[in-house]
Image (tube, rainbow, N blue to C red):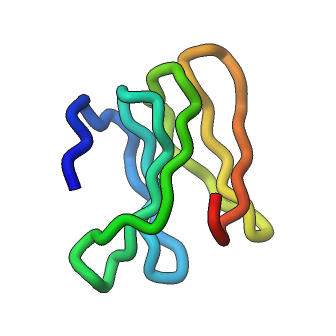
Amino acid sequence: MTIGKPIRSAPIVANNVVYFGADDGNLYALHALTGGSPLWSNLIGKQIRSSPMISNGVVYIGSDDGKLYAFYLAGG
């Protein structure tokens, strides 16, 4: 998988899935046990430089647009 923009977000791992944001404006979910095969991604639109946090089946991440986004772990 090629992202094409810098990754400044520190990753977080939960249930064998790696979550991180990138400067291309996407939040990514990659399967950790299959060499990083993509599970899903969601386009927020602005650069993501903050690190994600997970709570109660939801991944939260901030963006350079000043907003906090929330996505369900199962499918984004």
Tell me if residue 52 comes above or below residue 43 in the rendering. Answer: below
Residue 66 drawn at (x, y percent): 66, 16
Q: Quadrant of residue 59?
A: bottom right
Tell me if residue 74 comes above or below residue 19 in the rendering. Answer: below
* Quadrant of the snapshot with the C terminus: bottom right
Residue drawn at the location 24% of the way across and 30% of the way down? 5
Residue drawn at the location 31% of the way across and 85% of the way down? 33
Residue drawn at the location 55% of the way across and 45% of the way down? 42
Tell me if residue 40 comes above or below residue 44 in the rendering. Answer: below
Left or right of 18? Residue 58 is right
Q: Quadrant of residue 11?
A: bottom left
Tell me if residue 68 comes above or below residue 31 in the rendering. Answer: above
* Quadrant of the snapshot with the N terminus: bottom left
Residue 71 drawn at (x, y percent): 70, 52
Q: In this rendered view, identify the residue nearer to me: 4 or 32.
A: 4
Residue drawn at the location 27% of the way across and 83% of the way down? 34
Q: Residue furthest top?
A: 65
Q: How many marks?
A: 0
Residue 18 drawn at (x, y percent): 42, 65
Left or right of 40? Residue 7 is left
